[in-house]
Amino acid sequence: MIRFEDASVTYPGGVLALRDLSIEVDAGEFVVIVGLSGAGKSTLIRAVNGLVPLTSGKLQVNGREVTELSRAGMRELRSEVGMIFQGFNLVERTTVLNNVLMGRLHRVPTWRTLLGMYPKADIDIAARALGQVEIIEKAYTRASDLSGGQRQRVGIARALAQEPSIVLADEPVASLDPPTSHVVMRYLQQISRDLGITTIVNLHFLDLATAYADRIIGLRDGMLVFDGPGSACDAQVFEDIYGRSLTADDTMHKQAAL
Amino acid sequence: MTVPTVGIQAPNLPPKPRPSLFAIGGTLAAIAMTIVTARSVGFSFGGIVTNLGRKNSVIEGLLSPDWGQIWSRRSRAPFIETFQLAVLGTATGSLLSLPLALWSTRFGNPNPFTRGILRGFNNVIRSIPDLLWALLFVSAVGIGALPGLLALFFFSLAVTTKLTSDTLDGIDMGPIEAANATGANLSQMLRTAVVPQILPAYSSFVLYNFEINLRASAVLGLVGAGGIGNRIEFFRGRGEWEELWGLVFMFFLVVFVVERISVTLRRRLI
Amino acid sequence: MSVSFIPGPAPDLPPKPVDRFKWFFSLGVIGLVVWSALSIDLKWSRLLEAPGDLWTQLRLMFSQMELSEVPDLVAAMWESISIAWMGTLIAVLFAVPLSFLAAENLVGRPVAWVTRQILNILRAVPDVILALAFIPLFGLTPMAGVMAIGVGSIGTLGKLFYEIIEGVQRGPIEAADAVGATRAQRLRWGVIPQVTPELASFSLYRFEVNIRASAVMGLVGAGGIGSDLAQSLRFKDYGSAGLGLIIVVLGTIMVDTVSGAVRHRIVAGSSRQEEDEEDESLGLPPGLAGDVLPL
């Protein structure tokens, strides 16, 4: 479970990215966060695993107070939270399997990592994660030889290999074309439903958000402006979130049709 | 048969731009520098011509080198020693350069104080040339292969650390964020997110460093630090220039072959 | 409280490909290192004493310095700088014509090939060996160092120069051909104006490299501060050696700074005309890093 209480983040330089945010996400929920770029979506997601520290307020993740964690405690928390990135963040020059094994780092002794000698049990977990996103046949391919959609599947597998209770996805489809975006979104939805993983996804496109989300959270200028089921999201709500009427830029399909 | 040019009177060109102050100043400074330094070193063309034109054993030796040197038993041991010094100097120096370069980066070492110390150390060792290292170590630990190995160790450390650091400046930071997000510790992050990115370039630098070391190890012996240089110094002392040039030529043939191999390998690595 | 998930046995990974090149390469390297370490004529136990010896030496070097020696050592450093300057100048004088003869866009292939081989041979011989050869001819004087640096830099400079010349735009050369220019005229008006800034910048860079070379050459007797350093260490005058070392490092850094600034200015000045050539680190001309490495 994730609980924000009056959480605020101010970046050095004075930019207010989150203002007095209070939300709760229950275990197993599939939540999509929408908002303009700069609305605080990335900050919110990165606060959950401590990549961005709160300036004030409280944040509880899986029963831990994130603001009070030691370094080791922070690593412990991060090992339970998988993360998926817009730019995939794969090591291009190494194999898919090595990239996925990165998800096991917290469980594997450091000396084994340094020598690249992962225990069989951890390699098995990586194989299952690759199987889950149906890309196991590419295990020994270099990441640089994959297409964008395949890379993001490897990114999901890396997060899954952590055996996480929470997965954070920061604009996971922003670098992909529409059909591939749907494939990736379906994988995310599937891991949430089949494996009961709490999933928070940042999206720019509204049609994609309503198609997949159980619950939508709308941010504007770092403030919560909407929180409800996807079905309750009508044009009026979107105007609140975006501060203007919908345009073709805001939906993937209309934009793709242009 | 020239065609008359257009018009009768040549039109006025715009005023000719003056050469920049920088160009004038630079040229004058270069001339002044040349005059001053020429006096400082006692430069004279006449001197060069007479000194080079005189009958002398150096150039005679160069024209009829003793090719038998490579097979001479007394040259073989220093030859092998030179090669061993280059191998060991490269292996030790470049092995340590990887962590040194990693710990000198912002992401590899969050502590600004130790980072500053390491960077300062890198800069100092880089400003000392190979032969000077050799001289310092000969003076400190006596003559032989040991000062040669120590000299090549520091020299390799300086060269490979510099090249690797430059590569580290340009790596993709995405995997680092990803590794940190999985809860990896610092060394795990460096091993899995950074090292694979630079490994091909790093291996290539190590080979390149080996090439330089092989050449450098030829001269280390001139100050008593082991290898083929001892033998060169020996021939020089006795004025045996045929033998000296024979040895030098054979050595550079070896260097040339090693370089070809190394360049081929480097191309496969990148 | 992580979820043990994805039920069922682990799926099979595809067969792991074997990179034979990597395998042989690693094995070869390890073999070489082990062989060298075992067979080199060296008492490894001495290595343990080395740090202590080194510490003693450094302490002696930096605790017995006498400031009264500074002027003499600065003069010696100046001699090293002079050797580097005059040597570089000689090298440039020879490298420019040779580089024209090695550029395939100016002369025929056979001529270029032969010239390049000459440059390659000159490049292979280390400056210190050349210094050894010139000392019997010029005596233990700075001129031996000047000659060694001069001859030793021709190869590298020539190679860099012809690479620049081959990189010039074809337009001006064709224009010169089109108006019926002779070979010399083509060179003067089609090529030289294009390459002068880069040639100057390279030469200065080589001057910086040569300062280190000339400091080193003194160690075998070819003049400059290296001779003083070698003498001091040989006769165990450690204080003087320490002071000399400091002056070498400071002098080198100072010349580097000035020369680097001038190079920056030269490259910036020429790139204002051709905007595509963005000057990178230190105003070094592109493609330099791989070949001549500043120490």
Image (spheres, grey):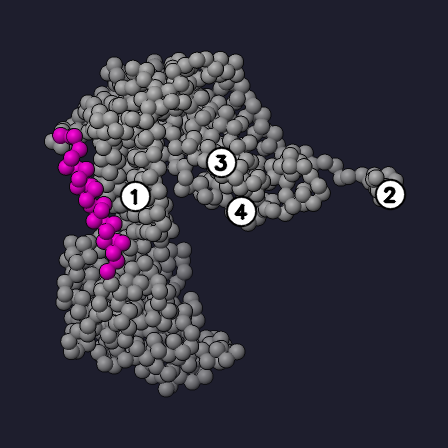
The residue type indicated by label 4 comes to Glu
CA separation in Å, label 3 and label 1: 31 Å
Q: Secondary structure at mark 1?
A: helix
Report the residue at 63% width, 43% height from top: C173
Q: Position of residue A89 (x, y in %)?
A: 33, 63
Instruction: State the SS at label 2.
Output: loop
Q: Give the residue number, with chain letter if any, for mark 4.
A: C277
Mark 2 belongs to chain: B
Query: Is there one chain holding both mark 3 and mark 4?
Result: yes
Contact, CB < 8 Å: mark 4 with mark 1? no
Q: Which residue is mark 1?
A: B206
Which circle's residue, 3 or 4, is located before the other in the chain?
3
What's drawn in magenta, residue-wise? Answer: C18-43
- Compared across the picture, whether C79 is left or right of C35 comes to right
In the rendered image, residue C4, in percent from the top left (x then y), is placed at 16, 73
For badge 1, the amino acid type reads: Val
Which picture quadrant has residue A61? bottom left
How far apart are labels 1 and 2 at the CA level? 69 Å
Q: Label 2 to label 4, Cα distance in Å? A: 41 Å
Which residue does the numbered mark 3 point to in the structure image? C114
For the residues tagged 3 and 1, is the chain the same? Answer: no
Name the amino acid, label 3. Answer: Val
Element type at mark 4: loop
Q: CA distance from mark 2 to mark 3?
A: 51 Å
Amino acid residing under circle 2? Gly
**Mark 2 = which residue?**
B7
- Locate residue C22 relative to residue C278 in the image: left or right: left
Label 4 environment density (alpha carbons within 10 Å; few <14, some 14–19, many ≥20): some
Q: Main secondary structure of the magenta part?
A: helix
Sequence order check: which comes first, mark 1 or mark 2?
2
Residue B220 horizontal side relative to residue C141, left or right: left
